[in-house]
Image (spheres, helix red, strand yellow):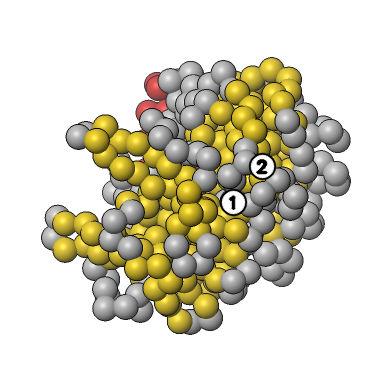
Amino acid sequence: MNTPSRRAGSLALALATVISASAIFASCDNGSGLFSSIQQETKATADSVFLKTAVRDLVYYNNRYYSQLVGIYSRPAPGTAASGWSLVTGLGSLGSNYGCRGLVATSTGLYAAIYARDGGTETPVGIYRLVGSTWTLLMPDSTHNIQALYSANDEVFATVMTLSGSTPSYDLYYFNGASLVATDIAGLSTRPAGVVSNGSIYWAAAGTSVYRDTAFNLTSTSIIALSKTATSIAGSGTNVYVGTADGYVLRVNDTALAGTPLLATSDTSYAVNALAIVPKGALPDHYLIAGNSYEGYYESKLDGAGVPDAFQIGSSRLVVASDSADYNTSLELLPVFALRYIGDDTSGTLFAAGSATMSASYPGLWSNAYSSSTWSGWTAE
C-alpha cells in the first residue's frame, strides 16, 4: 500500500517525467466496438486543457468524447490523446459563461445540467440536450439546483440539492424529457451515488441504502440497508457494487447484501469515488476497478458469479497499467472522481478523471486503450 512518504517521492518523479494515463451499465450507456487502434503514450503538454484542473466526468456521444470541467470540453473519438480538445459553446446565449454540473449520454442525445456564470454569481439554467450538433434547452429551470446527472437503461436521473441555512439536503429525480419527477429517494444528508440497471431492474445507491425497483421512475422501491455510506455504484447482471465513504466495496446480489466488505483504499479515511468493470485477457475474465479520493485505484478480479476477490493497488495487480512505473507516474498521484470504460469486451478505452489542482504540470484526465487482450498503458489527455 502507498504511504504519504511514498506519494511525495512519486510526485517528485511524476513532475519530472509525467507520462501517459461498462462492459458497465453505470451512469451512461456509451456505445461499443468503437476503436480500431491503440493510443500511443504521450507526455502531458503545457497547452493541455486538463493541466491543474479538476475533471468531474467523461462521456461518449456521437463519435466524440465530452469531459466535464467547469464547462464542457470535447474531442473526436477515436483520435489522439492530448489533442483536439476544445470548449463546447452553442448553449443559447451563454457563450463560454456557463458551467456544467452533470453530463450523461443516452440513445436520444447528450444531456447537460447547465448554470450561468456571471462574475461570482451562479444561476441554474436547466437541462440542455445535444442531438447531432444542435443544443436545445429541454427544461428551463432556475429553481432546481442540480448537482449531478445519471443515466441507466437509457433513462436520465438528476440529483437536486436544497439548502436549509447552510445544511444541504439531496433528492433524486427522474427526468421525463421535459421536467423533473420525484422518486422515493429524498431528504438525504449526502448526495446519491448513482443509478444502474440491468434492463429490467433499477438500483440506486444513496445514503446508507440501495433502493431497488422494477419501474424506471423509482417510485415503488424496496430498500436494501447498507452498513456504510455509498459514494459510487456499478453493476453487472444482478450484481451491484457499491463504493463507500470509508474505502470499502460492498456487493448487492439483486435483493440483498452478499459477501463481506472489501477494503479498496490504503486507509479508511479515503472514499471509493468511482467504480468500473473492465475486460482483461481471456473471457469471461473481468476486473472491478475502484478509484479513491486520495490517490489512484485498486483492482479486484471477478469470478464467474461476479464475486470480487481482495483488492490490490494498481501498481501491484497490473490489470490496466502496463507496469508499476506506468501506474506510479500517472494515476498513483490522482484523487479519482470517475472511471469510464467506453467499449466492449474486445476493444475500448478506460478514462480516469480526477483532481490535479495541486500541480501546474499534472493533468486531471488520463486514458488507457484496450485491444487484443492488452492494455496500452496510461496516457495523459
Q: Mark 2 highlights which residue?
A: 213
- Choose top left, top right, bottom left or bottom right for residue 255: top right
List x then y, in percent, for residue 206: 51, 34
Q: Secondary structure at mark 1?
A: loop
Q: Amino acid at mark 2?
A: Asp
Evaluate whether residue 75 shows in this view. Answer: yes
Q: Secondary structure at mark 2?
A: strand
Q: Residue at x 35, y 79 (%)?
A: 90
* Relative horizontal placement of residue 253, taking residue 358 as reference (left or right): right
Q: Is residue 380 above or below residue 72?
A: above
Q: CA distance from mark 1 to mark 2?
A: 8 Å
Residue 256 circle label: none
- Residue located farthest toward the bottom when viewing the structure as drawn: 133
Contact, mark 1 vs mark 2 (Cβ under 8 Å):
yes
Q: Is residue 48 above or below residue 351?
A: below
Structural crowding at the residue carrying mark 1, measured as other residues with C-alpha within 10 Å and reported as few (<14), some (14–19) or many (≥20): many
* Relative horizontal placement of residue 1, taking residue 188 as reference (left or right): right
Q: Residue at x 26, y 78 (%)?
A: 93
Q: Mark 1 highlights which residue?
A: 217
List x then y, in percent, for residue 58: 50, 57
Evaluate whether residue 302 shows in this view. Answer: no
Q: Is residue 75 above or below residue 104?
A: below
Q: Residue at x 68, y 28 (%)?
A: 251
